[in-house]
Image (cartoon, grey):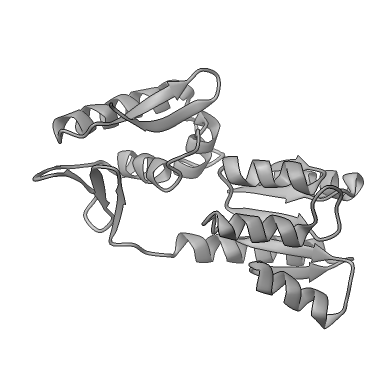
Amino acid sequence: MKVLIIDDEVKLADALAELFKQNKILADVVYDGEDGLFYAKNGDYDVIILDVMMPHMNGYEVVQRLRQNKNNVPVIMLTAKEEVSARVKGLDCGADDYLTKPFATEELLARVRALARRQSEMIYDTISYKDITLNTSNYKLECGNKSVSLGAKEYEILKLLLTNPTQVISKDTIISKVWGLDCDITENNVEAYMSFIRKKLFYVGSKLNILTKRMLGYYLEMEE
């Protein structure tokens, strides 16, 4: 699991990042709304922890812009205000949950796990992008009238790429999401699986490529 923390209270944000690390959850931290929106739009996160009052862009604007861009990552808003109107405004802007400061860290962890679990339980029969379709019930990759079966890890990797088609996905993110943080998988293993998936894309006649951006990760691109 990977979370993004957007909060201008530096000590609190850093403390939350350490809390997540201790609970084997990856966390990125930014300290203002403008940078937070950039990270949220370009990163791959399971949950976003978002403060309301911040410089440059407040939390309401951040979550509103995410939803306008069809980014449905779950958002927990943090607010120092106890008024019902503040909570309602956050939910109306697109937040999924909220916590009022100060809060118990155990409750934040529980809410993060619940939102991530709810997101992962969303089931789609197929995921389509460009000229391919990934069947989520039988792990088949289809293009036109040709299809090929994927192994479990091949399926999870391709699904991750297809559900984040405009983003560069790092090897560390792939390892943590597909195998888990405590695994012995190396970057060489990821490269091997990418090779397998590329061969299967070629087999079904897809023009979709998995390209590598040096030092950053993998992304999808169609042949001209």
Q: Nearer the viewer, residue 188 or 34?
A: 34
User: Quarter of the image holding residue 115?
Assistant: bottom right
Q: Nearer the viewer, residue 104 or 39?
A: 39
Q: Position of residue 23 (x, y in %)?
A: 69, 49
Describe residue 213's horizontal placement relative to residue 103 as left or right: left
Residue depicted at x 21% and y 54%: 138
Q: Can residue 19 be spotted in the picture?
A: no
User: Quarter of the image holding residue 172?
Assistant: top right
Which quarter of the image is occupied by the C terminus?
top left
Describe residue 38's horizontal placement relative to residue 42 as left or right: right
Residue depicted at x 60% and y 66%: 114
Describe residue 79's horizontal placement relative to residue 93 as left or right: right
Residue depicted at x 77% and y 42%: 30
Query: Looking at the image, is 70 positioned above or below residue 213?
Result: below
Residue projecting furthest to the left: 145
User: Quarter of the image holding residue 137?
Assistant: bottom left
Q: Position of residue 197 (x, y in %)?
A: 28, 32
Query: Looking at the image, is 205 positioned above or below residue 117?
Result: above
Q: Position of residue 93 (x, y in %)?
A: 67, 68
Q: Position of residue 170 (x, y in %)?
A: 52, 31
